[in-house]
Amino acid sequence: MAEEDTEPTPEEAPDGAAVFPLIPEELGVHPLLLAALHAYVFLEGSDASVLNAAVAEEAMNYLVGYFQRMEGDGLRRMREDMATLAGFAKAEKWPKQQVRFLQDFLKDNGITG
């Protein structure tokens, strides 16, 4: 009997790990922004039992610093993408806290260009 070609199912995130939901490609949000948001949410929201808080804070500072370098068309695109994400989150009835995170992300992190 031949073995079936099946993909292993991804393990669930451990307790205390903050995970940003998968965003559909069809939204057209820039993949690098999504990658950075996933890292940001994990670093900012995960418990100390999952990662080293001091190291996470240092990495967060770098992420935010890189975001703050955005200007011109890149910043405009980021604003549009964040608005798209917030609209998607509202339409999908995400918890208000997650919608607010997306709506306020740029302002809360001093990303003004």
Image (tube, rainbow, N blue to C red):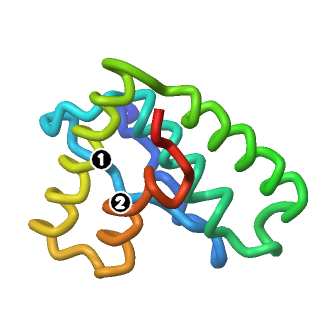
Residue 1 is at least partly visible in this image: no
Q: Nearer the viewer, residue 107 or 59?
A: 107
Q: Quadrant of the N terminus?
A: top left
Q: Nearer the viewer, residue 101 or 7?
A: 101
Tell me residue 75's x, y (percent).
Answer: 37, 29
Tell me residue 94's x, y (percent).
Answer: 25, 74
Residue picked out by circle 1: 82
Report which quarter residue 104 is drawn in: bottom left
Instruction: State the residue at coordinates (81%, 74%).
Output: 49
Q: Does residue 44 lie above or below 8 as drawn? A: below
Instruction: State the residue at coordinates (37%, 19%).
Output: 72
Tell me residue 55's x, y (percent).
Answer: 87, 52
Report which quarter residue 89 is drawn in: bottom left
Q: In the picture provided, is 92 more to the left or to the right than 11?
A: left
Tell me residue 63's x, y (percent).
Answer: 65, 40
Q: In the picture provided, is 49 more to the left or to the right than 74?
A: right
Pick whichever of labels 2 and 1 is earlier in the sequence.
1
Whole-angstrom CA distance, mark 2 to mark 1, is 6 Å
Counting other residues with Cα less than 10 Å from the Cα at mark 2, is it few (<14), some (14-19), or many (20 or more)?
many
Q: What kind of residue is marked 2? A: Leu
Residue contact between numbered discs 2 and 1, judged by CB atoms under 8 Å:
yes
Q: In the picture provided, is 14 more to the left or to the right than 33?
A: right
Residue picked out by circle 2: 102
Q: In the picture provided, is 15 more to the left or to the right than 62?
A: left
Q: Does residue 31 lie above or below 44 as drawn? A: above
Report which quarter residue 20 is drawn in: bottom left
Residue 75 is at least partly visible in this image: yes
Q: What element does badge 2 sit on? A: helix
Instruction: State the residue at coordinates (34%, 71%).
Output: 100
